Structure formats: C-alpha cells, structure tokens
Amino acid sequence: MERKNDSDMAETEEELTPVAKQTSRKRSDKKISVLWLRWKRRGMVEIMSDHRRWTLTNCVRIGLEKALADRTHMKPIEELTKDDYEDIRSKRHNETLDKKSQQSFEFATYAGEVFATLRNIINISEEEYLNSVTPMANRRYLEFISNSKSGQDFFLTPDKRFMIKTQTKKETYFFLEHLRTYIEHFKKYPHTLMVKFLGLHNIKLKGKKRLYFIVMQSIFYPDERIRERYDIKACQASRYVLPEKDGSQIITVLKDNNFGDNKINLGSNRAWFLQQVQADTELLEELGVLDYSLLVGITELHNDEKNSQDLASLVQRVTKSLHHGSPEKSANHAKSTGSTLHEEISHSAATLPVNGVMGSLPGMVDSDDPQTDPAVHHTSTGHGAEADSKYNMIANIPGLNRRLLLNTPNNLHIVDGEEYRYFLGIIDFFVTYSLKKKLENLWKKIRFPGQSFSTVPPKAYAERFRKYMAEHSE
C-alpha cells in the first residue's frame, strides 16, 4: 500500500475542510430546527400510528376534506335561510388509511353554509381553512396535553390555529337550536369575546359509537410567547390547580384561585372589554346557560409592540376594525364609500391618544368617562332613555361594539394592555340549568359553605361574572 506523505495529507485535509464544515453546519441547523419544533410543540403530542386516536383523527381529516372540497361560495349573512340552519349532509366513506387497514365510516356536516359564512366574515378563506384542518399525511394533528378534567378530547391542527373538540349529542343539538342567535349576536357585536365556532360535525366509525365534534378558532394562537394561561369562572370552590414543575410537558391552565387578586391590565381598552363582557353575558343569560369561562392567556409586550402608532399601521387597523376583513377587502370598501372612510381615518389618526386607543371610532368608548364602565352603570342596551344625552349615545355603542384591531393573527381574541398582551375568549357555554344542576346547587351549598361555586342560576352566574371582570381589570 502506498503511504501518503505529510504534504499530501495536508492537501487532502484542506480540500475536505469546506465539505466537512458544510456537513457540520447542516447537522447543527437540523438540530436547532428539531429543538425549535419541540419547543413550539411543548404540551402537545403528535398523533402517530400508535396513538389511541390515530384512526379517528385520520377519518376526521378525510371527512372534512371531502365535505369542504365541494365549497365554492359563501352567502352573505343576510341571505342565510331556515334551510341553511337546518341542513345536515351525511356521506359514507370507505378509505384505506394505510397499507394494512381499511376503514368504513359515516361523516355528517351540520349547517355547512352557515359556518362557511362565519368563516368568511372573520376573513378565513376556504382554502386556508381546508389546508389547516385537513393536513397532509406528513403533518399530523396534535393532542393537547392539559390538566382539563372534562373527559372530552382536544386536538389541534398542525399549525395550532384551530381546535377540534369532541362534545355530547345534547350539547350539539343545543347549539344547533341556538345557532341563528349566535350568528346574529356575532353580526351585532363583530368583536364579541365568545369563541368562534367554525364547523360542526359528527362521525360514526364501523363498530364504534357516533362522536360529535366542533371546530373552533384556538384562543391561544399564536401561543409561542404565552407564559400563563387561566380559566376563569368567577367563583372559588375547586378553583385551584397545582402548577406543574418547571420543564413539564403538560400545559397547565390555572384557575380563579391561582389568579387571586391579580388584574387584567387593559388600560384604555378596559371600557371596551367590560361592555363586551356585558353584551356577551346578557346573551348567555338569555339562553339560560352557566358554567362558562373566560380563557386568559398572558404574554409580555416587546418594546416595539408598545404604543405602535405609525400612520400606515393605523390606517390598516382602522379599516380592518371598521369592516372586519382583510386590508384588501377594506381597501375595496374604501373605494366604494368615497371620502367618508378617508375622513374617518384622518379624524381617528388626529385624535389617537398616546395609548393607541381611538375613542372616535364607531363602537369605541372613552375609558376616561366613568359612565362607560359597566361596573358603575349596569344599564342594558336600549335602556338609557332617562339618562343624559351623552350617556344615551354611549348606551347605543354596544350595538356597534368594535375596537382597534391589531395587525396580528387571531386579532379578535387578542387585546393589548399597557405592558401585556392578553388572549381573551369566552368558552363552554352549552350547560343549561337543568334539574341535575339544580340538585347540584343544593349539594354544593352544603359541601362549600361560604364559598362561591359554578352551579348557580344563569342570572346569578352572569351578574357574578360581570362583577368579577370589573373588579379584576384595570
């Protein structure tokens, strides 16, 4: 064997060094990418072939894909008919899930036209919705690992933008019964805090019980910077959870007693928040429901996110807030309305306070006026006839209750305070005050003397909820 001399070896080493460096760099980048993905998916488990819900989620994906593929248009909300609300479309499928198994199942879609209209209203195109909720085979659903004891399954889309949640048949048909009311409330209060439901379905696998599930917009999206999560019911009994240890993969959603005397520091957005809580809980009281929660996610604002007031951003945010759509839709609307919108934007820009809240926008409120605070005046919409003219004007605002939206995904559930960004949304409003709940009320009075608990009549629940939000915000 010919032995290479030192100079030959040096030349070879010099020739290989750039390649070696490139290979090393690729490995390093791959390692960083894997670590980044793991960090982004902390508290999540990918639903792989050995997961207990792998067959179910694959059938859900196929059912959604087939159901959504036929959608080509959405009706304006004013044109939705009784038939649209009562429409149920069911299909049978026989699909090969992998090389080894084939699965037969039925898949039903409730009120597809109605939910497509709602998706369109909040500026979610059918294409992006389809791509997110029906991921390709190499992009799997995520199981949300939390301390929830509801017994229901929660799945997230791979981008974590939408959540799929199983529910009971009773809850499904209760929601269908009141779907028109929900849509009309959203039409009246386009920035409602109530969670945005975007699809309702059921699935029946061969040999299995029928499962009902709903697709909703995730309130905690994007979640990479969220450092605390709370589920607030405005009561005390059984409302504390032990926080997980540092490094745990379980996402702990804390509760009222963990929140304690802390406050949601919204600054000038507080007045809007309290009015919207008032409007939303009045609806829930009317529906006769209780046990709902306000989800709260908290993240610190970066310095460049505080008091962002450049004019280009302002114009985009005003048009988005006024017309509740994309900048493109807003621009088209601006053209069709002539100078009116331009004048409104100019006036709003001129009157924008330092904290970034515009009191001059339709639906905006002036937080410096104590009469806008429901903690002081609990007058419902339409009941301000005996008040002075200024309060009469403010009392009519909730019918247009809008705010200055952020240029960020999921902006209907995101509100910036002075130091923190809050992810806010009301969830779980399907529990009625049934005989079972009335008996539970009597039992809890004995079990939790002197403590507030969740099982109370809808009117008392709503009033207590509003009072808590007023006392725990600033």
Image (cartoon, helix red, strand yellow):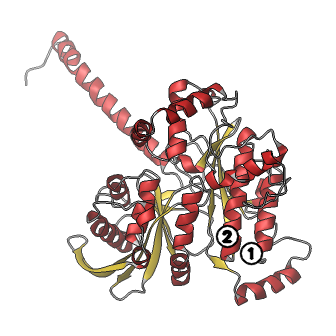
Mark 2 surroundings within 10 Å by alpha-carbon count, few (fewer than 14), some (14 through 19), many (20 or more): many
Q: Amino acid at mark 1?
A: Pro
Q: Residue at x 35, y 73 (%)?
A: 55
Q: For mark 1, what is the residue?
A: 458
Q: Is residue 41 above or below residue 209?
A: above
Rendered image: mark on residue 284: 2
Mark 1 surroundings within 10 Å by alpha-carbon count, few (fewer than 14), some (14 through 19), many (20 or more): many
Label 2 or label 1, whichever comes before in sequence order: 2
Instruction: Please tell me whether mark 2 sits on a helix, a strand or a loop.
Output: helix
Q: Is residue 356 found left or right of 406 in the rendered image?
A: right
Q: Residue at x 29, y 24 (%)?
A: 21
Q: Is residue 91 above or below residue 67?
A: below
Q: Amino acid at mark 2?
A: Leu
Q: Is residue 469 above or below residue 224?
A: below
The percent coordinates of residue 269 (x first, y second) are 70, 42
CB-based contact (under 8 Å), mark 2 and mark 1: yes
State the quadrant of the N terminus: top left
Res 151 quadrant in image: bottom right
